[in-house]
Amino acid sequence: MTVHSHDGDFRAEVVPLRPEEHREHHREHDAPEREHRSPVIREQDGEILDAVIVEETPAVPVDSPVVTGERGGWLQERRSYLDTAPAVIPTWLRNKTEFVENSKLGARYYGHKAAFHAARTPVYALRLMSKSPRGTARLTRRWYLWITDAEARPVMAKAAAQADPGAWMALTTMQTKRTGPRRRQSLVVAVPAGVLVLLAAFLLPGWALAAAAAGVASLLGLAGRDGDKPIVSRYVSIHIMRPLSSPEVEGALEAIGVKGKSDWAEPIQTDGPGWRAELDLPPGALASTVQEKRAELAGAMRRPLTTVWPGTDTDAHPGRLVLWVAKQDPSKMPRRLWPLLKSGQCSLFDPVPFGFSPRGALVELPLMYSNVLMGGVPGSGKTSAVMAIAAAGALDVTCEEWIYELKGSGDLEGLKPICHRYVSGDDDEHCAAALDGLKALEKELKRRKAVIAELPVDQVPNGRKTYPHLAARKHLRLHPLLAIFDEAHTLFEHEEYGKEAGEIAARLIRKARAYGIILIFTTQRPDAKSIPKGVSDNAMLRFCLAVAGHTANDLILGTSMYQRGVRATMFDPSKEQGTGWLARSALNTEIVRAAFITQEESHDIGRRAYALRKAAGTLSGEAAGEVVERVDDSTLVDHLRAIWPAGEDTMHSHRLVEALADWRPDLYGAWVATDRPVEAMSEEELRELRSARSTMLSNALRPFGVRTRQINKRSDGGGGKGVRFEDLPERRGGVEDDPDDE
């Protein structure tokens, strides 16, 4: 291209450095060019006035053939294929339960359709007969047009209008040839039909004539049908969603702010009772963001909130979105029944049924060697979740169940008949009873720990903990113990009992699970005050229902779970009661809807569990009519403080032992027992007896860090081993922490 100046003084010619057809090729494959530029004067009248000198370096490719050629080899490609290959035989053919359910569904569907239309057959017949006049008129008109050859009339009229006699005569002859046979055929049919009608009128009974007339009227009604008013009633389920499509998904993502092109990892496919879409979001977009905007996504897709479930694929990358859309609105579908609702038993050593995933799959909880923390706003469905666990414990006849329902609503009262301990209420006495229960659990933990510590190694092959074969030995009393503290914040926030309860609960939740003691804590106010840090940090299984913010979310599910995209703020408690995030670990989470058990059904389960336990002989505590006494968690130090004489700074050990035996003979009577009366002993024997009693007290005080020392009391026998009051530590209950139990 040549460019001239306005005054014609100079001209320049522009030559493209690269042909147009190669421009894209160079843009993709050439490395960035390094340019060395230096200003030069441009030329005018043979003189250079201004110019730029460009030096191009050779292009360097950035895609190495070695890297681009790496595909892992033949074996690795086949192994990757097998890892992700679909099943040869679909699950509904391999899974007996699923096959039976699908078969029952098909039989129920077609049986209902057949019965539905069979019951309406008389209505259909009446509708047909009501259309018979119109059908008669239509058939008569068609017969008349056929027998008169009405189709030829326009052609004959045109020939007559053009005054063409030859054409008109030819058409008339042709019409006669066509209409003649039609009249004769009509006569051949009409005469026998008329004769048959007359004979039937005289020979057939009335019911036969009526049936024949109805049949003829129905046939005539078929010809008189109206397309806008079908004879057969139709029912279309309004709950069936339209099939999921890629334009719908991409449009909805763009509507909620995910801009750019998404790459589909897999085609949209049927996944259980819904559709599954798997795609890679545009660079920079995270699947967790879509999860947080679940309500906006459902609105953009014009689908009910309960049918749209965005998720992530942790095995791929944070930008991989897995969207599952239900074919039917779960909130309008029949309730999925808890598997053990009507029959069956379970063992807490095996996973127990808890709820269902959005896809309808059963979700089980491994309660043994675990503990559970649940939380959610009021009305989010915590009662449903805790009821499913409590009912499972009730149907294990070896399980000893303790329930502390600190809301006072009686939601778990249906299981009271089988409970070893049952408390319902939110007053001071109920909180005191819950604290006493924690103390009793800690005492039971100490007993179980001592029993298991004495067992030979071959009976505890995988560590010193409770096993099914140990639980079966009744004399060891190592059976599962399920302790539920519903609305635990009522106890932990109590002014008098809260602090001590939090300390005991923190110790228990760290160590009790190994010894068959399963703790369940629920709260509707998940914050640092309502759930002690020691409890929230050491929970094994976590179930978070609808919450208001990220703080409550992370308190229940664990630190940084909100940032990872596991956000219970996405749930609507008014529409998704009982639905929450179940976290088995930081990397193992799923959405679960806890099985709903009505109050009436819980009472039925309680009665069935009571009968099972009575037959097995495993009723205990309040269920067996026993009176549960308060736990005496006082220690030797507390007893010494109780019997210490006022005004005394020191006391001889043998005097303290004698006082203890007089006050609590059930505990210390053996300490003063002798073979013969003290009065008959000599002075030497008395000194030996006092020394032995002093030694017993010294050994008993050693775990508390109290050392006996030589004291001299002239008014009380002179010198001897004794205790100073100031050496007695302040009261401290509970079991000492043992790092080996963690």
Image: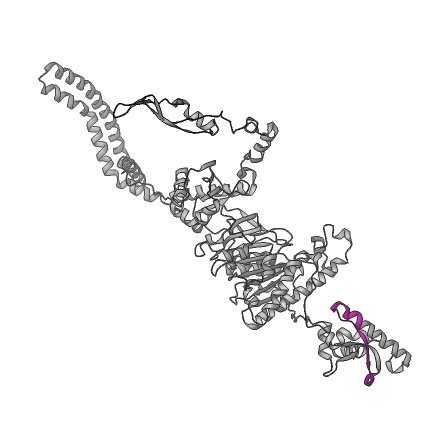
Q: Quadrant of the N terminus?
A: top left
Q: Position of residue 10 (x, y in %)?
A: 30, 23
Q: Position of residue 112 (x, y in %)?
A: 43, 44
Q: Position of residue 625 (x, y in %)?
A: 64, 69
User: Relative to residue 161, is residue 246 depicted above or below?
Assistant: below
Above/below status of 529 relative to 367: below
The residue under the point 77% across, 74% down is 668
The percent position of residue 208, horizontal first and vertical second, equals 32, 39
Left or right: residue 155 versus residue 275 is left
Q: Nearer the viewer, residue 738 or 196?
A: 738
Task: Depth check: give the residue in front, 528 or 223.
Answer: 528
Most extreme residue toward the left, as rendered?
163
Taking the spot 51% from the left edge, 27% from the top edge, the residue there is: 61
- Tell me, yes or no, whether the highlighted magenta stretch contains residue 714: yes
Is 164 displayed left or right of 563 in the figure?
A: left
Residue 341 in sight in this render? no
Q: Quadrant of residue 42?
A: top left
Magenta residues, start to end: 697-717
Q: Quadrant of the C terminus?
A: bottom right
